[in-house]
Image: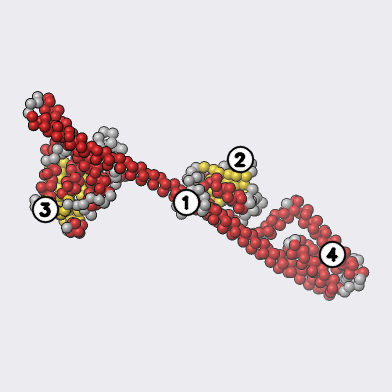
Amino acid sequence: MVQGLTDRRYLAWIKPAGRFRALGECLAVGSGLAVLTYGGTLLRVNLTTISFLNLLLVLIVALFCGFWQASLTSLLAVACLDYFFLPPLFRFNIADPQDWVSLGAFEFTAIVVSRLSARELRNANEAAINRKGMEQLYELSRSSLLLDLRRAPGPQLVVLIQRIFEASAVELYDANLSRTDKIGDWEVGEEELAEECYLHGAVQGDQKSPTLQCILRASHGSVGALVVRGNLSTLVLDALGSLAAIAMDRHQSFENEDRAEKAKQSEQLRTAVLDALAHEFKTPLTAIQTASAGLLELGELGNSQSDLATLIEHEAVRLEELCTRLLRTAKLEAREVGLQISNVNVQQLIFEVLASPTVKEASDRIKVTLDNPVLTVRGDRGLLSMILTQYIDNARKYSTPGTKIEIAAHEDPTGLLISVHNVGFTIRIEDRERIFERFYRSPDSKESVSGTGIGLSVARNAAEAHHGHVWVVSDEKEGTTFFLSIPNRARSNLS
């Protein structure tokens, strides 16, 4: 394939206007050859001298016009030499065979020299075009680093490409944003060229058309398509497409980071507000608990009044426990909590939790299984109690009424494992990690069962404070089981 400026000369030759122009150049050169040769005849210049002059003219044509024009010029030069210098003169006829050899040698030399000259000219033109392309790509790479990542990259890129590469029209399709941006003159029906190129994967560049297309590919796949109308080589177009894809990928990464940062700030604000509210709730809750306990101690209430006071006290205790969870969660997440490490008997811990008001109403449904009644673990009694309370409270709320809740604890070579099993709601696979995130609740149950989405996040943070791990296994037939694991290595580190 002819490249560089030679491409354009070849294209000019195959077009009607180009052919007429090339023929005009050849006629002008032919006239010059005729005048030069005839002048040599009048001045009685020998054949060798006039042949070198004609060869020089052929070389000049090769340098400034191209190989095809030089080849035609060499044929005209041979004809002029035959007509004006070789006997019989002024006739296209060669009597002496040696003259055939001389003219053949001249033509061969002229063609070889023209070919070499045209090749060097083409290489020089290609080097100049490639150097200019590299300079343009370098400028684009620098300019793309200065793009405003808060705005869509498409409108900025098409302006840069048109300005730097002197393109008559540019169109870019961004698959991430599902938008097309264009600049320059586009005809009717060409509004969606880039999108069609992306959807059909059609990459084409026709010699007879200055419109080139390419798919924009990033590390994770195709991100769009680019259509450029101008004088570009395919190598420059590929590099241009890579730079555009990188710019679009940077914008997408910035958008993701920006959303993550905003979500983080929103979470921090919500956490700060809830923690502040938890602190503020502590004082009135204490007053409510004291007042309800005082009413019950007076002993002068009727049955209905006593029931109401008991209900107030019970709900105040639950609200106070929720505030305590919020405050402990904030300290755990900030790594500000100080663990009160002691030897905790697992059986005593379980029965203390079962006696608490939060889970006491479901104690008749609970079955406890222990491998060893004197099994102990070194840890923070309050945090371990909080984890177990949350597990049992979850099992109570989400289990089928009347079914058993099974608590088991055993020690193996790796450490302590506590499990709480119930039969009821099944947790989907995609939610089994997310339910331990703060405020997240499974869509399958959040409408039917009340909750805050805080408890399991507290359990996870408390387990991590002990270098442990929490997880859940859920199956429609087998039920749902929450696990708490505290490894031996971590337990020894806590001591």
**Element at badge 2?**
loop
**Rendered image quadrant of residue 401:** top left
Residue at the image point whose x is 69% and y is 66% from the top:
120
Residue at the image point whose x is 64% and y is 41% from the top:
187
Nearer to the camera, 272 or 445: 272
Q: Which mark is residue 375?
A: 3
Above-or-below relation of 297 to 144: above
Residue at the image point whose x is 86% and y is 66% from the top:
36
| Residue 2 percent across, percent down from the top left | 66, 59
Sort mark 4 into few (<14), some (14-19) or many (20+) by Cα contacts within 10 Å. many
CB within 8 Å, label 4 to label 2? no
Sooner in the amino-acid sequence: mark 1 or mark 2: 2
**Element at badge 3?**
loop
Residue at the image point whose x is 79% and y is 63% from the top:
73
Q: Is residue 353 left or right of residue 76?
A: left
Sort mark 3 into few (<14), some (14-19) or many (20+) by Cα contacts within 10 Å. some
**Rendered image quadrant of residue 296:** top left
Q: Which of label 3 and label 4 is nearer to you?
A: 3
CB within 8 Å, label 2 to label 3? no
What whole-number distance in Å separates the C-alpha atoms at marks 3 and 1? Answer: 55 Å
What whole-number distance in Å separates the C-alpha atoms at marks 4 and 2? Answer: 51 Å
| Residue 29 percent across, percent down from the top left | 82, 61
What whole-number distance in Å separates the C-alpha atoms at marks 4 and 1? Answer: 62 Å
Sooner in the amino-acid sequence: mark 4 or mark 2: 4
| Residue hosting label 1 | 250
Q: Quadrant of the N terminus?
A: bottom right
Sooner in the amino-acid sequence: mark 3 or mark 4: 4
| Residue hosting label 2 | 189
Tag 4: residue type? Answer: Leu
Q: Which mark is residue 295?
A: none
| Residue hosting label 4 | 33
